[in-house]
Amino acid sequence: MHPDDILVQQSKSGNIDAFDELIKRYESKIYTVAYRFTGNHADANDLAQETFIRVYQSLPSFRGDSSFATWLYRIASNVCRDELRRQQRRKKISLDEMISQPGGNLSLADDGVSPEESLEKSELQRAVHRCLNSLSDEQRLILIMREIQELSYDEIAAALDCSLGTVKSRLNRSRQALKQKVMVDRELSTLISRQAK
């Protein structure tokens, strides 16, 4: 039996420590999905918290047809999509925080990397995020799951509740859409050509 399954059973029986352990195992991954989706630390924290609240509330109905991780990603993707729909209604999608704090975990003190190289990496990352965030919700979500979270096609299909063929075609279309955005983004094209030298 998978360790997650044991923790899920214990959580269903009211063991709060077991549920805390599940949170610890997945909170950084769920936060990353939310952050890549929103580009905002505060929103990402809220969405990760909302995901785990929904997981806790829905745990009694979890039958184990898929892995706990797949079920968790499905809930996280629904929470992110719900929030983006609300934001779009308010016309309030903002990447200000990402732009003002480019690079996230990139440090100017990387071993053997000059401040100029680090700044260039940071600019490249910001430009890629800008292109990623200009895609549709569905395209962004599937790219985050595959390219950033490195989920398998089967895991993505289960999380998004669609067929393997649908995942592959959506992923292909999303990659093409991102490629088009990159090609028309002058700043990003310049940065990429500089990196290639």
Image: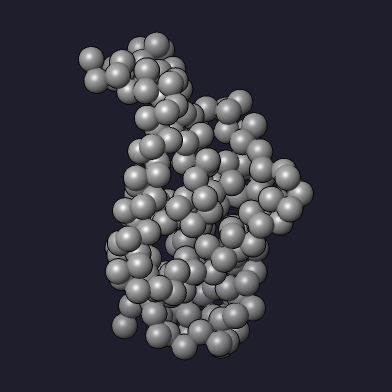
Q: Residue at x 52, y 62 (%)?
A: 77
Q: Residue at x 66, y 43 (%)?
A: 93
Classify residue 183 by image quadrant: top left
Vertical placement of residue 105 versus 83, above or below: above
Classify residue 194 by image quadrant: top left
Quarter of the figure with the C terminus: top left
Find residue 122 and report its horizontal and vertical position in percent. 44, 24
Residue that protrudes farthest toward the left in the picture: 197
Numbered marks: total:
0
Find residue 123 and report its horizontal and vertical position in percent. 45, 22
Vertical placement of residue 185 versus 175, above or below: above
* Residue 3 left/right relative to 45: left
* Residue 108 left/right relative to 11: left
Quarter of the figure with the N terminus: bottom left
Q: Residue at x 47, y 88 (%)?
A: 63
Find residue 169 and report its horizontal and vertical position in percent. 32, 60
Classify residue 165 by image quadrant: bottom left
